[in-house]
Image (spheres, rainbow, N blue to C red):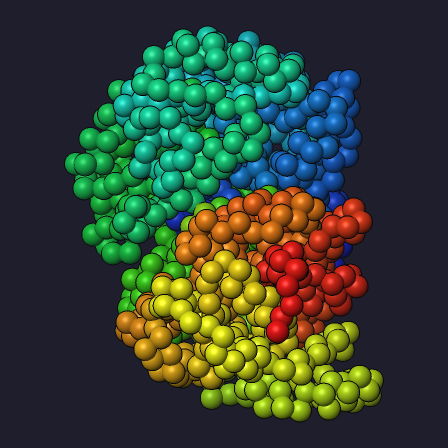
Amino acid sequence: MAAPQNPTERAELAQALRTAVRGEVDLGATARALTTMDASNYRRVPLGVVAPRDADDVAAALAVCRAHGVPVVPRGGGTSIAGQATGTGIVLDLTRHLRKIVELDPVARTAVVQPGVILDELRTAAAPHGLTFGPDPSTHSRCTLGGMIGNNSCGAHSVAWGTTADNTHALTVTRYGGDTLRLARGTAPEALTGLPGLPGLPELIRANLALLRTRFPELPRRISGYALDALLPERGTDLARAFCGSEGTLGVVTEATVRLVEAPAARALAVLGYADEAAAAEAAPGLLPHHPLTVEGMAADLVREPAGLPRGGAWLFAETGGATPAEARAHAERILRAADALDGTVVTDPAGQRALWRIREDAAGTATRMPDGTEAWPGWEDCAVPPARLGPYLRDFRALLAEHRLRGTPYGHFGDGCIHVRIDFDLLSPPGVARFRRFSEELADLVVAHGGSLSGEHGDGQARAELLPRMYGDELVALFARFKDIWDPDGGMNPGILARPARLDENLRFDVLPKRPVDVEFGYPHDGGDFSAAVRRCVGVAKCRTAEPAGTGVMCPSFRATGEEAHSTRGRARLLHEMLAGGAGDTGGAGDTAGVITDGWRSTEVRDALDLCLSCKGCRTDCPVGVDMATYKAEFLHHHYRRRLRPASHYTMGRLPTWLRLASRFAPALNALARVRLLAALAKRLAGIAPERGIPVLARETFTRWLNRRWGKGTFIFSNDEVAMVWPDTFTEHLSPEVGRAAVRVLEAAGRHSIPAGRGLCCGLTYVSTGQLGKARKVMRRTLDRLGSTLGTPVVVLEPSCAATLRTDLPEILPDDPRSAELASSVRTLAQYLEEYAPDWQPPRLDRPVVGQTHCHQHAILGDAAERRLRERAGLTGELSGGCCGLAGNFGFERGHWDVSVACAEETLLPAVRAAEPGTDVLADGFSCRTQLEQLGGVRARHLVEVLAEGLGEGTE
């Protein structure tokens, strides 16, 4: 089926869709670029995106597409790993509007949901009734019920609760062309005969009973192909089950009735250590008679930080449930005693369980990089064999990897015989792609030899459908095609997937990327200096699309504020991918087939998407593959505005250190002028500052002037090993010197002394965040020059964003200057410095609660473990919230960012502060965070060091 090729046909299609559909219709470059890929190796460029408002809109869109001969692909969270959520026609975005839980019946234990409902939203709604939805893939925080039905998703708890098909009662489905069918469980065999719109289906089943009864392997995770055996009379002619796993090739689910299961009131986790993964795999079936909720497995090569795991080279996670914690623990201990393990432990603490599960859930991302940094890819993500065959299969699988000189890190659902793995295929060169094909064919044969299924969870898509004849034989695969034709005689639903599939080595998303490294400013040390490799880090698992930050996590505040894919980390990475494919540097591609974004670094689509990136750096840590969108944004802005006029805010806030140095001598006068409303409004307009923002007050005396005056009194005699340099960052220097003064007091109390820093020191933060990288490089070199012989002295940086810049941006912008690495390695937060250089110092005991937020950059780059320990020693109780304050340096001050900035603050920070009890200290180590709290909440927050200094009870002079 060919999509419209010329502009006139496309315009006619767009007009027809806009006339028929009440939801959004977007055939623009941004919408198309955002949906070229899912979480697989594949890329197909759509004509546009339609976001239907309801089932009628779905039917109308499908009718228009059929009339114009345009294919359709339904899309949920876009986390499919086999390529089935990509297409060349119209993408139906079912996540924007069709996300209502229509009904939840706790008595019947069912829920009626629309296809865009996020799994965790359903689980949250069911939880007050003691219920949950059983299947729970690792993407549970962003995958949709419609996508789970399309792929017949499973998850860790399938040993207890089965697959999505096992938990689906009924479906309302709209076919290509717009007619709607109701598919129910337990349909009587004779009902097929009168089913409107599906002529020939009863005859297809009756004529092939022997084939359907003998050619489907019996195993818990058989997801591959169409589930035609569900239509056998002895299986109740289950149309809903037969539809599950059809990967959008038969129709579009507009409503589903699903089964809910009782959620255990308490859970425990038996963690069992084994010598290797084969030993763990062979042990897994022996745990099943004990009725665990999960039996998950992973080997040591997946675990980067094995804290909390028992001794061994591989582990099984066996979760148990109970009515009470004691009952759940006793169940886990029985499994531990019964298991023939090298070592084991039972974890009952919920936080400890979450930490261990996080290792497993992030594996879809972390496994995309080998320990040495080599890229690894999906494609054979979820083969399944009978659980009793898993051990021998894994040994044969490892041997096949070695034979092809490939590496992979298996993990997954050992209790169901399902293995996930990312493999270091070379998908960039013709020889590497040829080896990918050879390996795929041989692995398919190996899986079949062990009685398995090519897909055990994520579906076949483009990755494996070509190989289905090896599993089912040509006769049954031909039956699949006939089944597809009965449902979709025009072939408009997701063509190239499952039936008459595209080849597994076609449409690879890497084909269109530059053949040589693009000329860039940052060093990208973790990606071999290659910006394309950095962008390739995003594999699409979409952890950035979660509705709320996980615990103390940050990523991705702009997506949570807007709900728009373009403002997620993944969305921005997709736009950068298409930019590289379409013209940034020497791409080796050609025209429209190369990339959707065709004007390279000058792209307004990429610029607009990056505009709402707060540069919080949360993705650098929270993204399982370490996408660093703040760096990519700075890189893009540098090229986009090169030799061009920049926004006013780049010249004002982007060069803030310069302006504040000039302004400091006139601080009283400027502060007075800023209080004049008309003058302040004019200044904000000229400077590109949001009119809603207040202008911060300039300090009458800078921090370094105070420190030099204090040091000049000659009161200190100390040796070099007692010295620390308190970094005079722009914010501490000119806007909050009280923080610097407090730090000096605390350091002196700890027996350490602060030496005055050289004049004009600057980390370059504001230049980096606005993409003025040439200027940043000059500022950083000047700073290194002025430090001179003091390089190597421990540097206490009080402003987290400046510390993060010195730690990461400095060496990545000046990778060839050894002094940059030396300075980066000297940087400490105050808590880190005290812990390392004054470990015996006891802070004042304050014994009161605190509330606030960990700075984004602190979370992402520096970590806050030392701060947590310091607060605990000082008796400051309470957890600081995650997320982002929303001010984020220049971001929240810039015109046009007010609404998003406020939304970010209202997510966790402001509610936490409002809910705090009287007498609670509000902590915020970042100047931006303190300013946001003052301007939006009327709250005076303080740096941790100010609270400690107050507890010392000493003066500042």
In the depicted structure, whether residue 4 falls above or below residue 295: below
- Residue positioned 30% across, 51% down in the render: 373
x%, y% of residue 196? 68, 28
In the depicted structure, whether residue 647 falls above or below residue 903: below
x%, y% of residue 528? 29, 62
Q: Quadrant of residue 526?
A: bottom left
| Quarter in which the C terminus is drawn | bottom right
Specify whether residue 558 is in view: no
From the viewer's perspective, tell me whether residue 14 is left or right of residue 429.
right
Q: Quadrant of residue 329?
A: top right
- Residue positioned 52% across, 30% down in the render: 353
The number of callouts visible is 0
x%, y% of residue 764? 47, 76
x%, y% of residue 781? 37, 81
- Residue positioned 47% across, 56% down in the render: 834
In the depicted structure, whether residue 471 falls above or below residue 544: above
Q: Quadrant of residue 104?
A: top right
Q: Residue furthest left?
A: 403
Specify whether residue 372 is in view: yes
Q: Residue furthest right?
A: 677
Which of 672 and 95 lies nearest the eye of the viewer?
Answer: 672
- Residue positioned 62% across, 70% down in the render: 956
